[in-house]
Image (cartoon, helix red, strand yellow):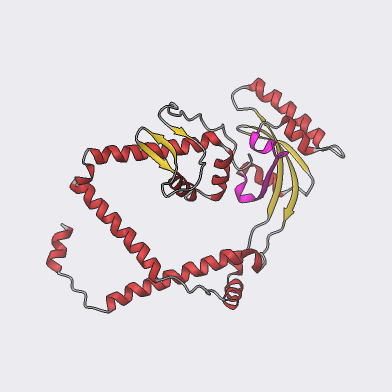
Amino acid sequence: MLAGCGDAAGKVDTPPQEHAVSAPVSGPASQVAPVVASLGTVVLTADEVRGLLAAVPPAERQQLAADRPALDRLLQARLAEKALAQQARNQGWLERSDVSEMIQAATERIVLSTYLESVSQAPADYPSAQELQVAYEQNQAQLQVPARYRLSQIFIAAPYGDAGAVEQARRQAADLARRAAQPKADFASLAREFSQDQASAGQGGEIGLLPLAQVVPELREVIAGMKAGQIAGPVQLPAGFHVLKLQEIQAAGTPALAEVEDELRAALRAQRQKQAARAYLDGMLNAGTVSVDGKALAAALE
């Protein structure tokens, strides 16, 4: 990929199946959530799995749904964590004074943050349409997006250090660039057949709509000088050769309010809540007299 080619992720070993078993959730709902996976006496219920997946970014969640081995590895990792926590409890780890202090501090932080969030929520109707419009007009510079380039590629691997392989890959990439530049050439078909970047090859070589900042530095000047529909390359990088096709250029500019409304609303609500939280804390300080014992403070700092 242009945003950073590299080797495929290493294989992750999984525990034997008799130790970690996962199965689809089925059957009628009941008060006790079904067990989805287990490791000895440690179990993961359907509710826990839903909570685990809810904490994963949406794009990664979709990938997990389509990749059963990766999903199993996630469940196995969580089971291992629960088993380790159970082992620590069985050994009286919670009774250690240092651990108890950390637990108390963490509990106070959680209570503080959740309670403060509850008392500083922005009104449900904030921001209004007028407030959104004003914020949009006042933040034109921050909302501006750079030019973006819809790119496709054919990648031929040729790592440095093997002169013969590099020369062979160079010839193959040059031939593909020549074929791709022919009238009525089907770049997507060439990419599917010959590109060695699996992630983009399956998409006909397309790697998406990217600003230059997200492209590897060695290719930025090449892409910036291309016109829509143009073929460029082969361009040699450490991992191999890239043949590029610029499908589309979207000029820099400020998106319409409708395109950024949700993002702008969330930012305004977060800002309003932060201000309300600060005011709430200041109000508590102003409601009473704060007394600091200088000697005790000095002793604590020693």
**Foreground pick, 254 / 105:** 105
Q: Is residue 187 left or right of residue 212?
A: right
Tell me where residue 163 appears, x and y as whole percent: 64, 22
User: Can you say which quadrant of the picture contains the N terminus?
Assistant: top right
Tell me where residue 164 appears, x and y as whole percent: 66, 20
Point out the residue furthest to the right here.
183
Quadrant location of residue 243? top right
Q: Residue at x 82, y 33 (%)?
A: 179
Q: Residue at x 50, y 69 (%)?
A: 269
Tell me where residue 77 appears, x and y as whole percent: 42, 37
**Foreground pick, 213 / 131:** 131
Instruction: Give, as a single range, the part of the protein colored magenta.
Output: 197-215
Tell me where residue 251 appears, x and y as whole percent: 71, 58
Q: Residue at x 66, y 22 (%)?
A: 165
**Foreground pick, 233 / 26:** 26
Asked if the magenta segment contains residue 4, the reply would be no
